[in-house]
C-alpha cells in the first residue's frame, strides 16, 4: 500500500514538471499562409490578447509569466503554428 502512495505521488510530480518553463515560437506551419502574427486570446477575459511572433520565447506560469500553464498546453497543441518546449 505504501508503494501505491509513492507511485501516485511520483505521477503527480511528473505531470506538473512536464509543463515547460518556456515556449519558443517557431512560426506558422504553412509558410504560404501569409500569417506573421498570432493573436492569442487568453483564458481569462480580464487579460488582453497577446500578439505572438516567430522567434519569440514565452515564459510559462505564475504572475510574472507571459502565459499560464493551461495556455501553454493550448499553444503546444495548436496545429497551425509550431511551438517548441524549452525546459530549463
Image (cartoon, grey):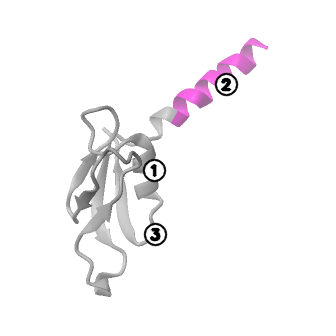
Task: Give me the disc on residue 8.
Answer: 2
Task: Give me the disc on residue 73.
Answer: 1
Q: Residue furthest top?
A: 2
Instruction: Name the quadrant containing residue 7.
Output: top right
- Mark 1, residues whose alpha carbon is within 10 Å: few (<14), some, or many (≥20)? some
Image coordinates for residue 13, horizontal then vertical, percent:
53, 27
Task: Give the SS element for disc 2.
Answer: helix
Instruction: Name the quadrant containing residue 19.
Output: top left
Instruction: Name the quadrant containing residue 80.
Output: bottom left
Q: Residue at x 41, y 48 (%)?
A: 43
Magenta stretch prevailing secondary structure:
helix
- Magenta range: 1-15
In the depicted structure, whether residue 5 falls above or below residue 74: above
Q: CA distance from mark 1 to mark 2?
A: 22 Å
Q: CA distance from mark 2 to mark 3?
A: 32 Å
Q: Disc 3 marks which residue?
A: 79
Look at the numbered discs 2 and 3 and tell me whether their residues touch, using CB distance below 8 Å. no
Q: Quadrant of the N terminus?
A: top right
User: Which of label 1 and label 2 is nearer to you?
Assistant: 1
In the depicted structure, whether residue 42 falls above or below residue 19: below
Q: Please tell me which of labels 1 and 2 falls first in the chain.
A: 2
Q: Residue at x 30, y 38 (%)?
A: 88
Residue 41 drawn in magenta: no
Amino acid at each position: 500500500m505504501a508503494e501505491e502512495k509513492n507511485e501516485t505521488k511520483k505521477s503527480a510530480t511528473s505531470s506538473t514538471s512536464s509543463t515547460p518553463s518556456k515556449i519558443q515560437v517557431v512560426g506558422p506551419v504553412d509558410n504560404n499562409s501569409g500569417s506573421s502574427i498570432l493573436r492569442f486570446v487568453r483564458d481569462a477575459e480580464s487579460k488582453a490578447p497577446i500578439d505572438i511572433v516567430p522567434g519569440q520565447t514565452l515564459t510559462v506560469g505564475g504572475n510574472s509569466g507571459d502565459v499560464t500553464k493551461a495556455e501553454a498546453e493550448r499553444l503546444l497543441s495548436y496545429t497551425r503554428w509550431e511551438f517548441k518546449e524549452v525546459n530549463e
